[in-house]
Image (cartoon, rainbow, N blue to C red):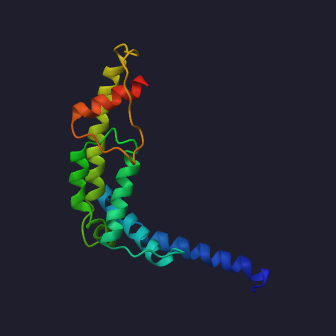
Amino acid sequence: MMSKKFMPVILFLTGASLFIAFKSQGNTENNDNPKTKYAKILRNIGLILEEGHFSPKKIDDAFSKTVLYKFTAELDNDKNILLQSDVESFKKYEDVVDDEIHGTKEIESFFSVNEAYQKRLKEVSVLYTELLSKPFDFSANESILLDPEKISYPKTEEERKDRWRKGLNI
């Protein structure tokens, strides 16, 4: 066991090492675009997951598929923003995320998923504003399944609108 008198030295060296490591990762130019910055961050996260994590992860195509699925699920947990066609279009990235993490491919998946999500979020914002502007019919005998494990993403905008209407009506 280490003596307590060496603890400040070890903490100082660790801190200095981390400072130098992160400083060396910093850009020398201030005109880095977001893709370059995200690529650096993603590479560092990948290195930490593969080499510095207490339970190292192998970053491969299986990892890519899991990350993409979890990211999409967390982004639209209630499955009421994205459409099924959006989620289907993300499948082309199932074996790409690991390459983006390793820096062998330019980051595209995150930006593509984010762009689709932002587009659908704007549509839903207009949709629920429209739905809330009209009185609700509480006499209708309707039900809605809310468990994300038991429902799929809406196939059409009309199906999404109906899901929102029922959800707001409850």
Q: In this view of the protein, can residue 50 be seen by the observer?
A: yes
What is the x, y in percent for residue 82? 29, 42
Q: For this view, does 135 lie left or right of residue 120?
A: right
What is the x, y in percent for residue 92? 21, 60
- Which residue shows up at 32% across the image and 56% down it? 34
Q: Quadrant of the N terminus?
A: bottom right
- Which residue shows up at 36% across the image and 18% down it? 140
In the image, 88 versus 41, the foreground residue is 88
- Which residue shows up at 27% across the image and 62% down it? 107
Residue 117 lies in what quarter of the image? Answer: top left
Q: Quadrant of the C terminus?
A: top left
Number of numbered discs on residues: 0
In the image, 145 versus 135, the foreground residue is 145
169 versus 111 height, above or below: above
In the image, 56 versus 164, the foreground residue is 164
Q: In this view of the protein, can residue 33 be seen by the observer?
A: no
Residue 83 lies in what quarter of the image? Answer: top left
- Which residue shows up at 46% across the image and 72% down it? 48
In the image, 113 versus 106, the foreground residue is 113
167 versus 106 height, above or below: above
What is the x, y in percent for residue 139? 39, 14
What is the x, y in percent for residue 33? 30, 57
Identify the residue at the far front of this view: 141
Q: For this view, does 14 lie left or right of residue 55?
A: right
